[in-house]
Image (spheres, grey):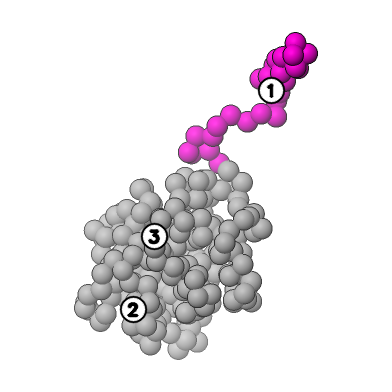
Amino acid sequence: MKKVFLVLIASLNFASTSPDVTPALPPATVLPAPSVTENNTYLSVYDQLNLSHLGLNKDVFAYALRGWEKMNTNKAVLSIVDLSQPSNKKRLYVVDLLQKKLLFNTYVSHGRNSGDLVANKFSNTHSSFQTSLGFYKTLNTYMGKHGLSLQLQGLEKGFNDNVYNRNIVLHGADYVCEDIIRKTGRLGRSQGCPAVPYADSKGIIQAVKGGTCLFIYSPDTDYQKRSTFLGGVS
């Protein structure tokens, strides 16, 4: 019994002085990017839907899943706007995680002051005409100047929590089409809204309305480090 006690004391002393022991991390600490093999029930959907072939990076899909889980929503539809891609690519992905179906893969605009072909500037302020990064919750539909539109709630303080007051919504637009790409090499740009082709807008809005998760992503260092939904990624 005495030997067991001495061994226990020695083990505790070693643990308290070992340089490999990492203390609990505060929320803002930068954590490693999620592994594409991390244990997630829905991560396999990426391969099943061949999203790599459609241009979506697997890490971006993993980030989106991380935020969707933190939302704690009972809606299994996940929408990803991948702004690491230029606007002449189909960079909107709407996925039904339970049914393992890709509902939509189409074009989506960024804000006119966020960049030309590629978005690289982002804002949460009024009249910036820039896109806001982060996780959103979809709200209710309404009829506006662009027809059927969808209100959005930004869930990340400092990054997109002003979007509702900025009237940033999901809507259809005639400047989001392949004809504009052929003429200019890129899509037309919005005042910060994620605008989609008119032909797809009604179907997309009906599929994602009422509390689903929308993730607008860019490899922006400040966002990745300070996002409370991602927990800080490198």
Amino acid residing under circle 2? Gln
Q: Is residue 207 above or below residue 25?
A: below
Q: Which residues are magenta?
A: 1-30
- Residue that numbered label 3 is attached to: 73
Residue for badge 2: 206
Q: Is residue 140 visible?
A: yes
- Name the one closer to the observer, 21 or 221: 21
The spot of residue 114 in percent (x, y) is: 42, 63
Q: Residue at x 63, y 31 (%)?
A: 22
Query: Percent x, y for residue 138?
Result: 33, 66
Quadrant hosting residue 213 = bottom left
Q: Secondary structure at mark 1?
A: helix
Q: Residue furthest right?
A: 3
Secondary structure beneath label 3: loop
Counting the numbered discs, the total is 3
Residue appearing at x 43%, y 84% in the figure: 177
- Residue drawn 70% across the image and 29% down it: 20
**Badge 2 density bin: few <14, some 14–19, many ≥20, Cα 10 Å:** some
To which residue does mark 1 refer?
15
Residue 10 in view, yes or no: no
Q: What is the distance, in whole Å, between disc 2 and disc 1 at their CAs? A: 55 Å
